[in-house]
Image: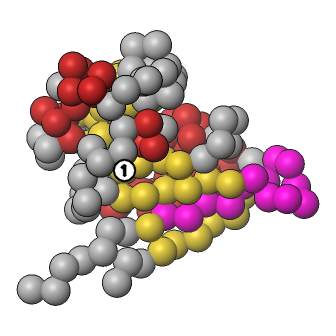
Amino acid sequence: MARNREFDTNSPEGLREPAEAIAELLRRYPVAVFHGEMGAGKTTLIRAVAEVMGVEDTVTSPTFAIVNAYTAATGADIYHFDFYRIDDPAEAFDLGYEEYFFSGDICLVEWPEKIPGLIPEDALRITITAHPADPAGRHIVVEEPERSQE
């Protein structure tokens, strides 16, 4: 059974708690997919996760590059993907996505719905939605993958 953690925030400072929770879970689930409408705050949350992990580089959306690479304070490699401009999942193969997703390195993925069927089953799933009553507010759900019964 999947476990969910939920967070509510209305400021960038409020992202620290969910970012810390995500960073901790990335130790078990190195691929994390971020769902949310345009402008929901996916890149902002990824920036907060990178900060918690000690990334010193400026974290920006790799919209045109598709992937940016960073290094955590521990020396771990972090890859930040933005598949928004992908028109065909075959483009992810051209990028060599499987070398990243199945490497054990941390992969933070925006717009995973653009590459259906390519996301590992054991990926961490994060959904960001705006609060209907507070335009600055965000509701964040962090969902661990289902564990198989062994």
Please tell me whether residue 135 belongs to the stretch shown in magenta: yes
Name the residue type under label 1: Ala
150, 53: nearer the viewer: 150
Q: Is residue 138 left or right of residue 104?
A: right
44, 113: nearer the viewer: 113
Quadrant assignment for the N terminus: bottom left
The mark tally for this picture is 1
Q: Is residue 131 left or right of residue 46?
A: right
Residue lying at 57% horizontally and 41% vertically, measured from the top left: 42
> Which x, y percent locates residue 6?
58, 70
Residue 115 in sight from this viewpoint = yes
On the image, numbered disc 1 is attached to which residue? 32
Q: Secondary structure at mark 1?
A: strand
Residue 55 in sight from this viewpoint = no
Residue lying at 13% horizontally and 33% vertically, measured from the top left: 99
Tell me which corner region of the image, top left, top right, bottom left or bottom right, holds residue 103: top left
Residue lying at 45% horizontally and 43% vertically, measured from the top left: 113
> Which x, y percent locates residue 5?
51, 72
Specify how the rendered protein is coloured: secondary structure
Question: Taking 108 as reference, is 20 above or below it?
Answer: below
Question: Taking 52 as reference, is 148 above or below it?
Answer: below
Please tell me whether residue 97 belongs to the stretch shown in magenta: no
Tell me where the magenta segment starts and ends, as one range. 130-142
> Which x, y percent locates residue 20?
46, 57
